[in-house]
Amino acid sequence: MSRDLALTDRYLEKIGRVLEPADVSEFTHVFTTGVYAPRPVFFSAAEIDQLTRDLETLRGALYRLPQLLFDGDIAAFATANGMEKAQIRAIERSSAAVSNSPTSMGRADLYSDGSGFRLMEFNMGSTIGWDSGDICRGTLADPEFSRFAAEEGLQYVDTAAEQVRTIRHEMGLAPDARPVIALTEWPSNLEEMRAYMSALAKLWTAHGLDAHLCHVGQLERRDGKLWLEDQPIDIVYRYFMMEDLLDDNADAVLEPLLGALEDGEVRMFTSLESELYGSKASLAMLSDRTHRHLFSDEELDVIDRLLPWTSSVTSGRVILDDGSEGSLLDHALANQHELILKPTLLHGGQGVVPGWSPEVTPEDWRRLLLDALDGPYVLQRRIHAIPEPFPEPDGGVRPWVVNWGVILMASGYGGLLTRCAPADGEIEVLNLGRGALLGSGFHVGPIPRP
């Protein structure tokens, strides 16, 4: 489905100026530099409906990978994702303590290439970044845009409310329950994340959760419970990531939490296992043409439409995106400007190398590929994003590229996190840490809820 820009055209005609949120909450303020994309982006009702159904189908296929490819062996699945022994042990112990299926919480990062949306990454679990509703509220404070939104029937999703609803649903909480939640980071990351997580804890308090900020090393077991100082914890909200578990002291730091999980003394949102399904290696498993017989016709249709050709970086022969079999290294060397190299498990654009970057010479590219061979890396076919018009401060229009971060929650579509940058700029990977700007997104009409 190609993008329908009629609403964008009407926005540029009727408002046509830079429009940023008039005011945002503490949570959004610490999440950004205070500079936002020059206008909101817009989804049609048909785009929301199609994307939600497609992404839920794709998520279901990802969640079936351990059974389809590894006979349900989660350790083998983790190994294929590039996990190390310490990480695999933690995944096995925490997964054994969780009876419910993997989470519905995720964020798909997509680009529009003219024929439709194409998936770059699909992040799963409690560590997804998000903000949408607060920026939308701030944007609606502009009277002119508020009138435009009313005329067009524009709405937005309050992602914070949907997140809390998802926590309650997946943890089996009653609507009026007020659980004590430990919002938990890794010790070495807490100070950097303190302002953001403190603001998030306050936001959750407004939604009926009793959240307390900590790092995992502060959690203790005693008297059949997990404690944060003198407070017994009902739920650990995991904000630390799999890469943190490679620290030398990870086993000792994690032991109270893992032991409490195994003995049913606490619950965790979300499981460590959920990060496996958000790995780039898992996308490569979906893309692998030798696996096509394992998926339903509906799943294959979504894989073909959404997922660019993605392959593990192997020294062996692979099925290429044209259906032929060949050497991955030879293919990658011959198609440098159409491929991007990514580590399977890192986040935030770390280690990502676009082959088309003018800074990456053919010699650099070859060296990078040789270093990555048979390691935790994937190659993915480049997505040629179609820019959209954004207003300039001087009244002109400039083409910008949009990374559409579509959020899924228990109730379906959970909002939009966009990262935007000028198409003629120097930002090759749209990441907030690299200079892309956060934006807001509105859609037309109500979203059906289960």
Image: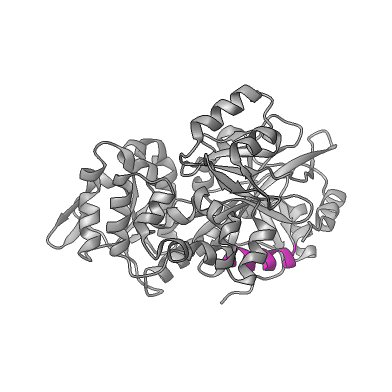
Position of the C terminus, as image quadrant, is bottom right
Per the rendered image, the range of residues in magenta is 44-57
In this orientation, does residue 309 appear? Answer: yes
Which residue lies at the image location 51% right of the left edge and 64% below the top edge?
A: 162
| Side of 340 where 246 appears, left or right | left
The picture places residue 112, in percent across and down from the top left corner, at 73, 51
| Residue extending furthest toward the left | 223
Residue 9 among magenta residues: no
> Residue 383 versus residue 129: which sits nearer the camera?
383
Position of the N terminus, as image quadrant, is bottom right
> Residue 130 versus residue 59: which sits nearer the camera?
59
Which residue lies at the image location 50% right of the left edge and 49% below the top edge?
A: 281
| Side of 429 where 210 appears, left or right | left
> Residue 274 versus residue 364: which sits nearer the camera?
364
In this orientation, does residue 228 appear? Answer: no
The picture places residue 75, in percent across and down from the top left corner, at 34, 55
| Residue extending furthest toward the bottom | 450
Q: Picture quarter containing residue 147? A: bottom right
| Image position of 192 with respect to 447: above or below | above
Residue 53 among magenta residues: yes
Q: Picture quarter containing residue 102? A: bottom left
The picture places residue 342, in percent across and down from the top left corner, at 55, 39
